[in-house]
Image (cartoon, helix red, strand yellow):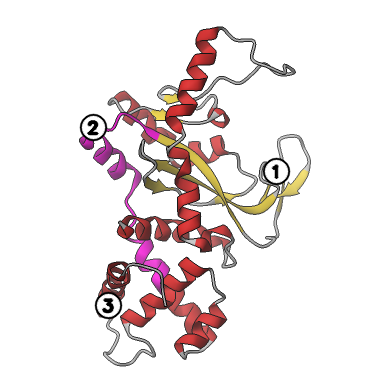
Amino acid sequence: MLDVPRHVVEFLARLLAAHRRRIGTPQGSRALGPFRQAVLVLRWFREHGCVHCLARDAGISQATGYRYLHEGIDVLADQAPGLHRVLKECRAKGLGHVVLDGMLVETDRVTGTHVNSQGKQVDTWYSGKHRSFGANVQFLSAPDGTPLWVSDAEPGSTTDITAAREHCLPALYKAAADGLPTLADSGYQGAGIGIHHPHKKPKGSSHLHFHADTQTHNALLRGVRALGERTAAELKERWRALKRVTLSPSRFGDITRSALVLNGQWK
């Protein structure tokens, strides 16, 4: 049994069938048809099962299981919308704002070190904020929390503001100038015009030494942004493979984009 709506399986099966025609795969030459391959891919996303077990259940080898899984990830990731398209559609729908945030896609320990700004050698894929190894992925959501866009993955040691500057801030500036501001948390302080975030408390203070208007601004901003912040939880709980990915870190961006596409087909 697969607890995924049948139309989601059929959607992926159609994409896989079109991909096979595009690359000239002879009919009947594959161990699994497009529908059964779609079930294997969706089981991995939904159940976070080991590829060996999924391949065994499908009656294929582990190597073929991995090949089919990566093929499914590729065809799904190709369907993910680009940032400029998403922002254009948001303006066309008259949305009042979008919500920007980051999430950590955890993984097994990944080798690689670098020297940080303080001159210390640290693990590139280790997130001090989350105290775990993984990748930093930025995402945009609608005011009601609907996932809209996800970025490529950066190593876990990358801060949210740095990842946002790399992948989305220039486009968000243009969107803000056109009447679509972005709401973010205090980790994006200094992001620039059009990116609204709460004001941080003064360093070394136990409470905010701010005017009442500033405290009210922070409370209202956090309240409006709250629904948008549930996006990461929705993606990870619905597509449990995002909770801990054991594939190569080079696939993290495509995996999160694939989950975004599947999530859009769920409703």
Which of the two marks, 2 or 3, is nearer to us in this view? Answer: 2
Name which residue lies at 30% across and 43% down.
86
Tag 3: residue type?
A: Ala
Image quadrant assignment for residue 88:
top left
Q: Nearer the viewer, residue 76 or 20?
A: 76
The CA span between labels 2 and 1 is 38 Å
Q: Which residues are magenta?
A: 70-98
Q: Earlier in the sequence, mark 1 or mark 3?
A: 3
Q: Position of residue 265 (x, y in %)?
A: 31, 59
Does the magenta portion include 82? yes
Q: Earlier in the sequence, mark 2 or mark 1?
A: 2
Name which residue lies at 45% across and 48% down.
151
Point out the image quarter for the N terminus: bottom left
Q: Secondary structure at mark 3?
A: helix
Q: Secondary structure at mark 2?
A: loop
Most extreme residue toward the top, as rendered?
Answer: 211
Q: Label 2: few (<14), some or many (≥20) within 10 Å?
A: few
Is the magenta region chiefly helix, strand or loop? helix
Q: Which residue is mark 1?
A: 128
Q: Which residue is mark 3?
A: 17
Q: Label 1: few (<14), some or many (≥20) within 10 Å?
A: some
Tag 2: residue type?
A: Gly
The CA span between labels 2 and 3 is 36 Å
Q: Position of residue 25 (x, y in %)?
A: 30, 85
Left or right of 229 on screen, residue 24: left
Q: Which residue is mark 2?
A: 94
Q: Position of residue 209 (x, y in %)?
A: 64, 10
The CA span between labels 1 and 3 is 43 Å
Does the magenta portion include 263? no
